[in-house]
Image (tube, rainbow, N blue to C red):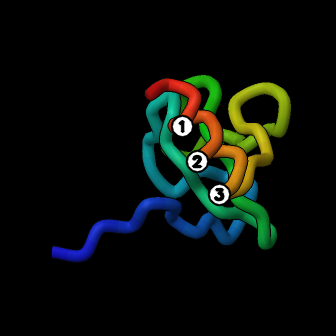
Amino acid sequence: MLHTLAPFEPTVKASKNYEVGEYLTYAGNLYKVTAAIAKNANLVVGTNIEVTDVVTELNLLRSLI
């Protein structure tokens, strides 16, 4: 089974439910979910998602070790 780590969202409406800490891609950017998002809810930077990148996320993981 293939798992998607950062599903692509084609519009500002979430295509599925997201939990805090999950990732998604929208408009060519990688975002981390900062507040739970219900399916069809708006994706709002600063409210329920924040822009991130792989290097930032790896550095966060490294700091936990």
Q: Quadrant of the C terminus?
A: top left
Placement of 41 over or under 48, stated as above or below: below
Label 2 sits on what residue type?
A: Leu
Which image quadrant for residue 28?
Answer: bottom right
> Are the two marked residues, 3 and 2, in contact with CB atoms closer than 8 angstroms?
yes
Compare residues 48 and 32 and report the one nearer the observer. Answer: 32
For the point 64% across and 27% down, which residue is it? 34
Question: Which residue in the structure is indicated by mark 1?
Answer: 62
Compare residues 15 and 2 and report the one nearer the observer. Answer: 2
Q: Position of residue 49 (x, y in %)?
A: 71, 37
> Are the two marked residues, 1 and 2, in contact with CB atoms closer than 8 angstroms?
yes
Q: Quadrant of the N terminus?
A: bottom left
Marker disc for residue 58 = 2
**Separation of residues labelled 1 and 2 (CA atoms):** 6 Å
Which image quadrant for residue 35?
Answer: top right
**Separation of residues labelled 3 and 2 (CA atoms):** 6 Å
Question: Which residue in the structure is indicated by mark 3?
Answer: 54
